[in-house]
Each structure stands twice: as C-alpha cells, then as structure tokens.
Image (cartoon, rainbow, N blue to C red):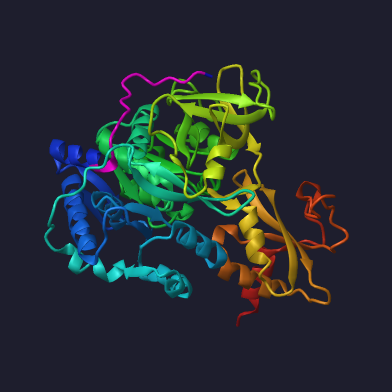
Amino acid sequence: MRGQFLPGTVVGRRSLLHELAQAERIGGDRLLFRWANGEESVGKFAQRVRRYATGLRKLGVRAGDRVATLALPSVRYPALWCAIAGLDAIEVPINSQLRGPILEHVLRDADPQWVLGESAFLEPLEQFGSTLGLQIINISGALESDWLKEPEGELHDPEASETAAIVYTSGTTGPSKGVVLAHGYFPNFGELWHRAFNVQPGEVFYFAQPFFHVDIRVIVAMCLISRSALAFAPKFSASRFWFDVQAMGATWFGAVGAMFSAIAKHDPPPSSQIKLTRGIGAPIPEDAYAYFEDQLDIDLLCLYGQTEADGVVFDTADRRDRGACGWTCGGFDVEIHSPDGRAMSTGETGEIVYRPLVPNMMLKGYWRRDDATVASFRDMWFHSGDLGRFDDNGLLRFVGRAKDVIRRRGENISAYEVELTIQGCDGVRECAAVAVRDVIGDEDEVKVFLVLDDGAAFCAKQFFVYCRRMLPNYAVPRFVEIVSSDSAARSAGTGAIQKHLLPRANGPAVIDRQIVESVEKQDIP
C-alpha cells in the first residue's frame, strides 16, 4: 500500500529540544505535565532542562558520551533526555526491570560512559559497575541539590539526523539490539500521532507505562507540537484507572492489550462524569471494544509500529475496524511479502515490510550490529519480522510474529535471553521458552520446557525465586514443564530443540507459577 500523510502534517522536524524551545516561545505558562500531586508548565520544564544540563556538564558529561538512564516515571526523566541532548550526548534508556545476564549484556553492548539512576535501580548495577568501568550517579540526591542551581552555558541545538538515543529492543535469535534513533525521529512521530489521533490544544493524555520505552518520547513531542499535556502515573493500576483519569482531567489515554482487559473488569463512573473520548494502543482485545465502545461510547484507536518505527499505520476516526491496526496514513509504504520477497495480494498473509517517504522516521541502524542492519533492510524494504495481511478496505491486520519473540504485558520478551538466563539455574541443562496464549488481554504468557541435569531434583519454589531475581518481572515464566532430553524433538543438524513441536497445552505435568506462589503465601503464618 502506498503511504501518504494526513492533511496538515508537517514532518522534517528537527528535535525534541527544538520543539520545546518553540513551545516555550509560544506560551511558557501552558500546562505540559501533570501527575498525582503536581504539575509543570512548558516554561518550568524548559528551565528544569537547562538546570539539569548544567549539572551534567559539571559532572563531566561531554559531547558524544553515552549516558544510560534508569528512573521511575516522573517529570525528571524527560528533563534528563532533553538535558543529555542539550550537551550533544547520547541517551541510552535502560529497562529498569532488567537483571542478571540481560542487564550485563545491555551495559556491555552500549558501553556508556555514565549511568544516571535512582536509588531503587542501582543495586543490580553494583556487580557490573567496577568491571565495566561505569561512572554511576545516584540522581535521587543530585537532582534535589546541585542540579537545581541556576543554569549556565548554552544548549546544543541538534541536527535532525544526529543520534539522539540508543533504545534496546528484545533480540530474536540473539541478544537484545540497540536501535539507533535520530533527533528528528521523536518529533516526526509526535506529529504523526498528533494528526492521526486528532489531538487538540488543551487536551490531556493519560499514560501509565514505563518511561524507558520509545513511545513516551514520541508522546512528549506530540504534546509540545499539539499544545496538549501529558498526565502520567508511576505504574499502571486498573483499580485506580478511573480515579486517575478523572482527577487528572484526562480526555484520552494509552494502553496495551492486558491493560485494556484489566480496566474492563472494573465498574466505570457514571457516564456524566467521564471526560475520556478515546483510547489508543495495541493490541486491543475484543472485551475492551465491548467495554469502552459499546458500553461507554469511548472510541479505541489502534496502530502498528516497532521501536524501529513508532507508527507505520494508524487508525483514524473515519477509517478503522475492530481487529485491524490502521491504514497507511503515516508516511510509510507498506507491503506484505512472501519468504521469497514477492509482494502478496490482498487477503494473503506474509511478512510486514515498510519504508518511509521522508528521512528520520526510522532507525539509523542497530548499534554495533552492521550485520543485523543489513539483514533487516533487503530489497529496499525494512523487514519487520511480523506477519500480517491487508483486508479489502486497505486496513492492515496483524497476524503474529515470525520471530522467536514473546509479547507480554506490552513488552517484547526475547526467548533467547530467557533461555540463556534460566540455563544458569542450578540443575538446568537446557531450556526452551515459548509463547502460550493468555486468555486475558489476547497476549502471550511465557512457558518454559526444562531438561534437567542427570540426577537433579526440581524445586518449583526455588526455580521461580531464581527467575524473579534474574529476569524482569514481565519475563518470569508462568508455566514450567520438565521434559527428558530424548523426548524433545531436535534438529538433525544442530541438535537444537524444535520449539514449534513442543506442546502448548497445559496438562497435569505443567507447573503454574501463580499456583505455586499462591500456596506459598498461604503457608506464611
């Protein structure tokens, strides 16, 4: 499908910092951020950015440095992104849930000169700090003292094509890769979100997802461009959703599959008290449509994107359908390709491939992975690794993932990294991680098959304790099944377990983490 732009779309934007400077000139008193116990205007935020840049400069951060960040959702986090950009340095947002080998890989691969983290996230870094030569700064105290002094010096004004950030996305057949993004990427997609979702000045967007994702940077740019505001919560709570959106004056919100379903289990306030007009996200389960659209008359709009390109197709109010991801109104040509590279017809399922119409709307490449960059761009198309099809109305329908990656609670989980980590558990010889369907939220749960060492005993309680210590919460397996080495089908060439032949159904031999942890809680006096 040939890409186009919605009327009024202005791409070719320069940077998040540039949009902030423009917004400050237009109206510094306008609301930009709101949270449970406070809010901040455009002007106050811009001043905060300048102060943080002064603090980072005094610490020794210089142009070209890579600066890793780990922090809870707060107004301080986007101020750090902008301050780092203002020093011509490169941000490396780190998933604050990473532990063990996965965290070590990201730190070794990114090789940052600096790590800025809040107290709660610094402990997992201690085992790597000295060996990797990291300069770790506890921002919990620094931001409240030295960095709040008057700003000094000018900020760098980045070019659109300069590198802004390296954002890590889950690996497929290997470790996580760093996606290199240019400064122009964030405001360009902010403009696309603004147009596709018809964001009006003064609107308030409610967001309760992590701040290390690429989406939040696009959303902040969108708010600056559209003269709207961002309301955020430190973490998602379905039971607090309606209280939060009402208290913060939200007119629209963002979520992912399981979040939609969790909200739908709670009684909404009276319709006369509801200000929400629409929600956006992906995937959107059927029970969410029934709850929000049929019951509450709140439109749900979907989109399809990746860290590599944060919005390839979008729903718009006048062109959408339940179960579809959107249409090519965001400036990307999109096709469905067969394994041999043939463009497929309407209704046929194949790999989703795409390419932008203008610069700085996609990744620049994968950090220190020229091989992966070349492999992803073939025949003048970026190969997503996702499967989909176009319907008769020109809407893209997502079918699944061709890659060995699991999607849970809005996070991509690398099966490779889960397997690598679990194979470090005492008594485990081999591990194969697969996705099993979650009946709530139409997402994945993680199931692992374990081959134990000869004579090793398996203790489910100890195994899950290990997993919680070494894996992000969202990647901890839900189900475990012990198999013998000779019972698993293997590749004739490599001897690797053939995961597509492993049973997804949960029989009596399957251990459910939720049951194990529930029994453990009951045993506590």
Q: Does the segment drawn in magenta span residue 351?
A: no
Where residue 112 appears, x then y in whole percent?
A: 39, 60
Front residue of 458/149: it is: 149
- Quadrant in which residue 323 is drawn: top right
Residue 33 visible, this angle:
yes
Q: Is residue 95 left or right of residue 172?
A: left
Q: Give the total of numbered labels.
A: 0
- Where's residue 464, x and y in %? 65, 69
Quadrant for the N terminus in the image: top right
Residue for point 30% across, 67% down: 139
Q: Quadrant of residue 80?
A: bottom left
| Vertical position of residue 277 compared to residue 173: above or below | above
Whole-percent x and y of residue 362?
A: 44, 35
Predominant SS along the magenta part: loop
In the visual, does 126 lie left or right of 227? Answer: right
Is 6 within the magenta? yes
Quadrant in which residue 192 is drawn: top left
What's the magenta region? 2-17
Residue 72: x and y in percent read 38, 60
